Image: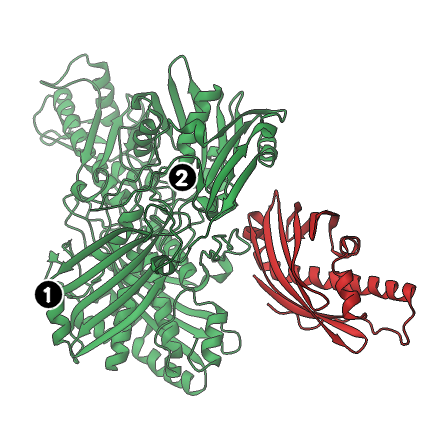
Amino acid sequence: MKIAGSYTLPVTPQRAYELLQDPEVLARCMPGTERLAKIGPDEYEMKMKMVISAVQGLFAGKVRIADQKPPEQFRLIVEGSGKVGFMRGDGLLTLSSASATTEVHYEGEVHVGGVIAGVGQRLLDTTAKIVIRKFFEKLAESAGQVVEAVAAPSSTPSPATPASDSN
Amino acid sequence: MATTITKTETLVGKRIRRQEDPRLITGTATYVDDIKMPGMHHACILRSPHGAAKIRSIDIKPAQDLPGVAAVFTGKDVEGVGPVPCGASLPGLRVPPHAILAKDRVYFIGHPVAVVVATDRYIAADALDLIEVDYEPLPTVTDPEKALAAGAPAVHPEWPDNTAFLYHQEGGDPETAFKEAEVVVKQRITSQRLIPTAMETRGVVAEYRSAEKSLTLYSSTQIPHLLRTLVSQMLGLAENHLRVITPEVGGGFGSKLNVYAEEALMGFVAMKIGKPVKWIESRRENFQCTIHGRGHVDYYEVAAKRDGTVLGLRLKLIQDLGAYHQLLTPAIPTLSVLMMPGLYKFRNVTADIVGVFTNCVPTDAYRGAGRPEATHGIERMMDLLAAELKMDPAELRLKNFIGKDEFPYATATGLSYDSGNYAEPLKKALDLVDYHKLRQEQKQAKASGRLLGVGISTYGEICAFGPSPATPAGGWESATVKIEPSGKVTVMTGASPHGQGEETTFAQIAADELGVPIDDVIVVHGDTAVVQYGIGTFGSRGTAVGGPAVYYALQELKKKIRKFGEMLLETTDVTVSGGQCVDNRTGKSVSLAQIAGASYRAMKLPPNTEPGMVATYFWEPPNFAFPFGAHIVVSEVDRETGHVEIKRYVAVDDCGNIINPLLVDGQVHGGVVQGLGQALYEQAVYDDDGQLITGELMDYAIPKASMVPWIESSHTITPSPVNPLGVKGVGEAGTIGCSPAVVNSVVDALSHLGVKHIDMPMTPEKLWNLVHQGGQA
């Protein structure tokens, strides 16, 4: 399954880049994440609960960050497996500045297998979209809080809105 | 002595309700899952989540430690158990070793890897989650044409071309036919992979008695005796120490005409743990691990004259075999080739099959097994030729039919069609739809923007499998008929009916031959310890091959009845009728009950006659039988939604003599519904990673009652000369006749947009795109 889309975050690219690689922020924003811990340079261990259709289960896996070009782009490589199947994802995130905000463009491919592939197929697309949207919404929220706490911006950040999610 | 009921009315030919239905519709029938035994354990099977992977390691310890788990077995534990057998042989066939559990590599989604046995099914299922398998995923290929391309991942590393076999058949002089043709029509036609979806999934209960060294397998199968022979070989068990019992079978459609890993595996487990064990396949397992059907990509070419006379036929058939050969996998496409000329006088044919390995579950026989694909191909090609020549498709067919005075007819593919009158059902169907008026209506409808189409399919099929030299196992069938001392009649058939209704049709035959009420007859089947060896039920052979065996056993029995009758009546000239043996000179009679009683009591015996009233007959058919028919579909495509509405479905089937019209209608209805499934809804879809994404009934669309049109079923009757009943077989006819009629009607509805062919399933999305993109999909 191919995924692609973009989202606007109310912070500078540099800040967005940092947020997107901060395990604490990611753990807080990624729906279902129960644990995200650094286990090496640019490598994290993850535990995540996923619900797709009638199937739900705990995934354990690794997240790796590669091809870093701060603050413009990096690659996220995710691998997880659980009793209900496995997933592998590889995505490129590109950050571009637009006045006081950052547009994050993502593009990647997700492979799923096992029960989730056989059962949840029709809902996989929708589920992926929802998960990604929720992630960015929470991230935007976090970013807003962080931004306010650190240095109040001159104007109120516009609420983040999901842009064209497509597959 | 009981009162003798004299029966004069014959039952064959009557609409008699099925004897088996009361237990089936009141929920009192016994299926495998209804079997419960003291101390019975339950098995669940761990299956590969990958389309292809190496198994680096398996850790079963945590599963073994779960309270309630009795045993866990993996591939290395079952090395001594024989491979899953392939019964088909073709020259140069590559047969991958097919272990009952994978050892170091998995080849398709659902490939069995380990089995857990526990005190209940829930514990067994939970324990599966505790087994840690370290897989190294490998690239997969699930599309047969992609599998043939250079550089495709090798399903079996030892055969990088993914080719299991090449098969060529030729008749006449196709090269000259194509050279001399005035018109050649070509088309790529697919018959997509289908999931048989029997209502009852597979299931096995195995019980081993160590003191007797005897194993009993209860299995939901179509072939109890063949299963016994093959599983005993797999387990290294003496065949007479294995008993196979087939309780009620909730549908098979060919998917249970097989020997599966799980059948041997449960035998192995029961012998190992010394406890009865039950395994019931889940629906998801059924979709992933029970054989699929069809899976063809066909390239057709038809050579013809401008006047519509067909000259030659060329076919390249790419068969998606899946990762292994199941019992008949590689043989199925050869049936397509045999029937490729259909009902037409193609004297020059050539066909090449490429059998292709893919990372999918094996394909094998599914209702029609090779003939729906062949019929779909030739019936689409006839319509394409008619369109090319601007001829009426009915006229083109009538022009090219084998004539009714040409039987037996030797086809260019080496068959001898037994009997036929192919124009008759077509003419009857055309009358039923009022064809000429219908075409006028269609013209008006199209002029007003409606997408109305008429589709014709005239099919022929090979069934009543079959003469033994032409079948992988024997092709005969057996019957034993007993008259019990009380006069009640027991028929034991070697066929294994599972919904077809032979408990009724065979009782009708026996009741007529002996002149007893049908309620005095019971039909017994599906227990290798009770019933003489038999072949089974598949290929529309139950009545067409099993029926004659019953008939001939009855003739043998009647000889003995006459001998006892003559002795008791002290005469030499008797007739058996109406449940009596009648002295033709005096009119004096004795009842069958009296005769049976005397035969068992044996106070006195006729000369050279044994006591008892039992006869067994093994009947070898001299040929296949070839039913035929015409199906006409009127359909309308909704311009806004792409939905197909079947406005009329007319089926005129000729299955020879009809023993029970009610049951024949039932077979036609069921067959047509499965054909509609293929034409409109169903497709097994694997993604490029080898995941079966139509993995359950939420995603794999089978027709529901509300989606099925009224089926106007009628018949012509051309008796088969092959068997004494004159029957031809009807189990698969509906499926075979259906899909081309539906597709032809929809292509006809869209023909003015330039649409010439549509591959199945014709989903609303596909048709909407055709309508809205000017005929380009």
| Left or right: B409 in relation to A110 | left
Of the 4 image quadrants, the one containing the N terminus of chain B is top left
Does the image show residue B170?
yes
**Above or below, B552 relative to A134:** above
The colour chain B appears in is: green
| Left or right: B646 in relation to B652 | right
Judged from the image, the secondary structure of the residue bearing numbered disc 2 is loop
Q: Chain of mark 1?
A: B
**Residue at the location (42% across, 17% down)?**
B209
Callout 1 amino acid:
Asp
Residue B20, disc: 2
**Foreground: A23 or B297?**
A23
Q: Residues within 10 Å of mark 1 (few under 14, many from 20)?
A: some
Viewer-nearest of discs 2 and 1: 1
Quarter assignment of residue B309 = bottom left
Please, which residue is most extreme toward the bottom here? B447
Q: Residue B421's x, y, as percent?
A: 18, 62
Find out whether the residues at labels 2 and 1 contact each other: C-beta distance under 8 Å. no
Q: CA distance from mark 2 to mark 1?
A: 51 Å
What is the letter of the red chain?
A
Q: Chain of mark 2?
A: B
| Left or right: B186 in relation to B743 | left
**Above or below, B606 relative to B141:** above
**Residue at the location (26% across, 65% down)?**
B378
The number of numbered discs placed on residues in the rendered structure image is: 2
**Foreground: B673 or A56?**
A56
Quarter assignment of residue B560 = top left
Q: Which residue is mark 1?
A: B173
